[in-house]
Amino acid sequence: MSTLDWNNIGFGYIKTNVNARAYFADGKWSELEFTDDEYIKMHISTTCLHYGLQCFEGLKAFRGEDGRVRLFRVDENAKRMQASARKLCLPVPSVEMFVKACREVVERNMEFVPPYESGASLYLRPLLLGSQIDLGVKASPEALFLVFCSPVGPYFKGGMAPIKVIIDRVQDRAAPRGTGDIKAGGNYASSILSGEKAHTLGYSNVMYLDAVEHKYIEECGAANFFGIKDGTYVTPKSPSILPSVTNKSLRQLAQDMGLKVEERPVAVDELASFSEAGACGTAAVISPIGSILDIDTNEFISYGDEVGPVSLELYNRLRDIQYGRAEDVHGWTTIIE
């Protein structure tokens, strides 16, 4: 195992042994290749550099209490990348190639999977880049698919803690019938300005509303939103929201706990009726929301300074599956031998 100080790594890039690559040209994918080269040689007129023809994924591998390494729901990330590729008119990687690349990247970088007791994990970043050399705005018939990894520390180093969120109507994250439902890099670029504004004001995240009426909740930063009330797990439904693998998992676990699950439009006026609220995604699993400030109306909603009991149980149940502490009854993990 690597000699890294596992208790003091953050969410940044750390060089590992190898990354995986495959190329699409002349109507077919090449075989996967593995290299220790951290750089991509790319023509100055490559399509992805000019017109944003690229998408990506993020998933993790965990070293369990039993010493075994588990990838979490890798097939779901593969299917989501396929959906992104289709919408961007990029060559579509097969689920089999995606899963094989992720598995082998973990296998070849096993020494960088953090020890169980550290609470850290190995983060995988699959990328799909349109690699056609062109000046025109058009589909790219060539592509580069790659997967690299880096060990990352736990999101909450001192334990889960509620975050402060603001609602900002000045900037929209994504438009209806646009690319908000896929994991395109441009969606994240468009969130930087409002995110920086929130951080400057002392808030952890921005809550985005729908771009048409600014009435319904879309996402919370780069994560899905959920609220708890009256024994129900409520999460927004919209064609411009990224379908989160974590949210999908939490919805199933909520049902397992006996909660009712509702995917539907959630009006911003409904926020005050929730007993708990949170943002969910790969990085943190759940970021419990302690308070929300609407900077336009000056309305302030507080959910308290402690993590809500339902959010905490959902978090623990998911983490127990990821780390092999609980039976994986839904078949979500892939064990890397």
Image (cartoon, rainbow, N blue to C red):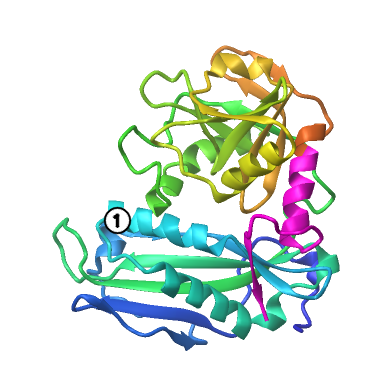
Q: Position of residue 60 (x, y in %)?
A: 63, 64
Q: Identify residue for label 1.
A: 86
Q: In this view, does 320 lie above or below 217?
A: below
The answer, for residue 39, to whether it is visible in the render is no
Q: Is residue 105 magenta?
A: no
Report which quarter residue 334 is drawn in: bottom right
The magenta span reads 312-337
Report which quarter residue 335 is drawn in: bottom right
Q: Where is residue 211 in the image (x, y as percent from the top left)?
A: 38, 26
Q: Is residue 42 left or right of residue 244?
A: left
- Going 49% across and 76% down the picture, which residue do you hit? 101
Q: Position of residue 252 (x, y in %)?
A: 63, 43
Foreground pick, 256 / 235: 256
Q: In this view, does 37 lie to the left or right of 155?
A: left
- Going 76% across and 48% down the picture, which residue do you hit? 317
Q: In this view, does 61 lie above or below 33?
A: above
Report which quarter residue 199 is drawn in: top right
Count of numbered labels shown in the rendering:
1
Where, quadrant-wise, is the C terminus in this rendering? bottom right
Q: Does the magenta stretch include residue 322?
A: yes
Where, quadrant-wise, is the N terminus in this rendering? bottom right
Q: Where is residue 326 in the image (x, y as percent from the top left)?
A: 79, 57
Q: In this view, does 154 lie above or below 104?
A: above
Name the secondary structure under disc 1.
helix
- The amino acid at mark 1 is Arg
Taking the view exactly as shown, the residue that stands out farthest to the left is: 136
